[in-house]
Amino acid sequence: MASGRFKKILVANRGEIAVRVISACKELGIQTVAVYSEADRYSSHVRFADQAICIGPAKSARSYLDQASIISAAEITNVDAIHPGYGFLSENAGFAEVCETSGIKFIGPPPEVIRLMGVKERARAFMREMGVPVLPGSAGVLSSAGEALEMADSIGYPVILKASAGGGGRGMRVVRAPGEISALFAQARQEAGAAFSSPDLYLEKYVGAPRHIEFQALADEHGNVEILGERECSIQRRHQKLLEESPSPAVTDAQRSEIGAALRRALSASGYANAGTVEFLMDETGKLYFIEVNARVQVEHPVTEFVTGIDIVKSQIRIAQGEPLREILRGPVETRGHAIECRINAENPDTFAPSPGRVTGFHVPGGIGIRVDTWAYADCVVSPYYDSLLAKLIAYGGDRGEAIRRMQRALSMFIVEGIHTSIPLHQRILADPDFQAGRFDTNFILRFQQAKAEAAGK
């Protein structure tokens, strides 16, 4: 499909990201079509869209992952484009191709770029060639446990086996000694095959106490790339992020400039277009190493929007319409202040067990520097079929200290009744002296919960 101004966009997602995309479309004067499962019949994105079509039963495989149903809905409603949000089909190169062959613009990177970035060992090799720092590891997919053993011996232990096609902590095993390779290789292959339909693994040096840093990119369809700073994503549980902020307390101006320049070169050379996030690990010495690209909008994009003043979702749509970055950004990217996002999940704050059910009371905070992205409302039902994200609470301040205090104030005024939420956990994290001082890594939550349990046992 030729680029041009869109009149109608189908949102191939649900929950808060579907509402977020619909909001961006409304501001651009574009009509929207919501698709929904039977379980989401009364969800907010269905109410706010101009049209809505049921595409199947509650299970994702028969609704939000059903490409045929989504394309049929798009054709019936005569849309110009599809925005996939995050998750579901957002990084599915095959779906992007189906959209294009159906004459529908896919609001995301080209299929060939999704394939390049989606296969992690290929992305690593490409970034290494482009001068982006990459952790020592295998040059491609491992053919056997024996090859993994040879590679681990040459790099030095500990190492980590990772699913080439996956993420989110699945298909990953840390190997600390040669005798562990065989069993852990088999376990990781089996888990990767079940989770991602591909058992392929690669290996890299394991960093025991890293920080998780990601850089936000925007690229137009004319070869221009801009980096909108970085986000700190180290507060996570089992590789699932709980709290993000921008800028990172650990990244220096020199690193920000150096990595930004390298990523502009690499993404431009790859033919990347639209929004994307490039993820890095920072080791104990402060060095950054590339790990993967998320070829889509991220859950935590609002913190970058706060500190840059750039609407990333509207930018995605405008890029897909063929507009150049110079018209979208209107000048150099500058960052001001500090922003923090807490993911308010419908789960027990101590055990992390999901807490589906009816929300009997719901009040969101407001005031200067506060934003809430949510699909929830009083008397809505949190379904057990999907992820537990209920809302995203974002606080902005002139500096990190003010952002923390505003977040603490907002958390105390956020009311959700009828189910458990992660709000009490976030309140404890924000009050922690190490968090307030910026002293943390990806093991923070494990140590934090252990300390809480030890204190309770005294």
Image (cartoon, rainbow, N blue to C red):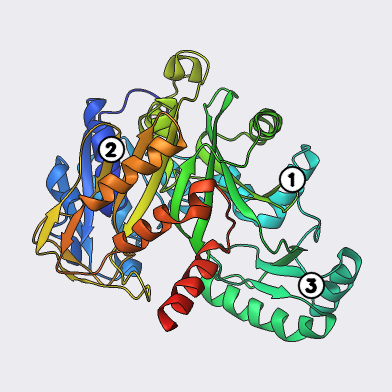
Q: Position of residue 395 (x, y in %)?
A: 34, 40
Q: Which residue is mark 3?
A: 143
Task: Give the camera-side residue of 54 and 155.
Answer: 155
Residue 37, x across and y down, in percent: 22, 62
Amino acid type at circle 3 is: Ser
Q: Which mark is residue 346?
A: none
Task: Tell me, yes or no, if residue 121 can be seen here.
Answer: yes
The kind of secondary structure element at disc 2 is strand
- Quadrant containing the C terminus is bottom left
Between the residue at mark 3 and the residue at mark 2, the CA separation in whole angstroms equals 50 Å
Q: Give how far across and how far down residue 241 sits, in percent.
A: 47, 57
Q: Crowding at label 2, few (<14), some or many (≥20) Cα neighbours within 10 Å?
A: many
Mark seen at residue 370? 2
The residue at the point 41 percent across, 50 percent down is: 86
Q: Is residue 451 above or below residue 98?
A: below
Going from N to C along the chain, the mark reached first, 3 or 1, is 3
Asked whether, in this view, residue 90 is left or right of residue 73, the answer is right
User: In the rendered image of this protein, does residue 348 appear above or below residue 168?
Assistant: below
- Looking at the rendered structure, the secondary structure element under dot 1 is loop
Q: Is residue 238 visible?
A: no
Which one is closest to the eye, mark 3 or mark 2? 2
Residue where numbered disc 1 is placed:
287
* Residue 141 sits above or below residue 353 on the image: above
